[in-house]
Image (cartoon, helix red, strand yellow):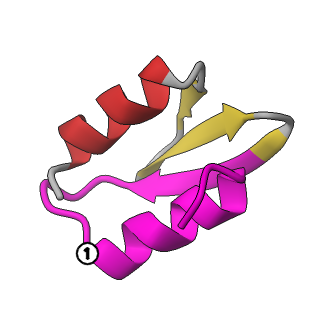
Amino acid sequence: MKRTDFIKELEQLGATFKEGGKHTKVYLNGKQSTIPRHRELNDMLVKGIRKQLGVGG
């Protein structure tokens, strides 16, 4: 999945973001995760981030 598509998906769910050095911190529903700065994200990584944020997996 493209990183930009995943970020747009999270934005629609109400997530907020804070840029780090080599990653982006994402906050949603009182939970936090990080998204690495790669153009393409592995499907398993996306699934794990969704699970950490409590939006399915």
Q: Secondary structure at mark 1?
A: loop
In this rendering, the answer to whether 32 lies above or below 46 is above
Mark 1, other Cα within 10 Å: few <14 / some 14–19 / many ≥20: few
x, y percent for residue 18: 58, 28
Q: Could you tell me which residue is drawn at 70 percent across and 34 percent down?
A: 28
Q: Residue 42 falls in which quadrant of the image?
A: bottom left
Tell me which residue sits at (68%, 51%) in the image.
53
Q: Residue furthest bottom?
A: 44
**Residue tagged 1:** 42
Region of the chain picked out in magenta, as a range? 32-57
Q: How many marks?
A: 1
Classify 2 as above or below 26. below
**Looking at the rendering, in which quadrant would you find the N terminus?**
bottom left
Q: Residue 9, percent across and down? A: 36, 33
Residue 10 rendering spot, x and y as whole percentages: 46, 33
Left or right of 46, for residue 39: left
- Asked whether 38 or 50 is in front, the reply is 50
**Vertical arrangement, residue 57 with respect to residue 3, above or below:** below
Q: Residue at x 24, y 65 (%)?
A: 41
Residue 13 percent across, percent down from the top left: 54, 25
Q: Is residue 54 magenta?
A: yes
The front one of 4 and 50 is: 50
- In the shown orientation, is residue 48 left or right of residue 54? left
Q: Is residue 24 above or below residue 46?
A: above
The amino acid marked with disc number 1 is Asn
Left or right: where 51 falls relative to 20? right
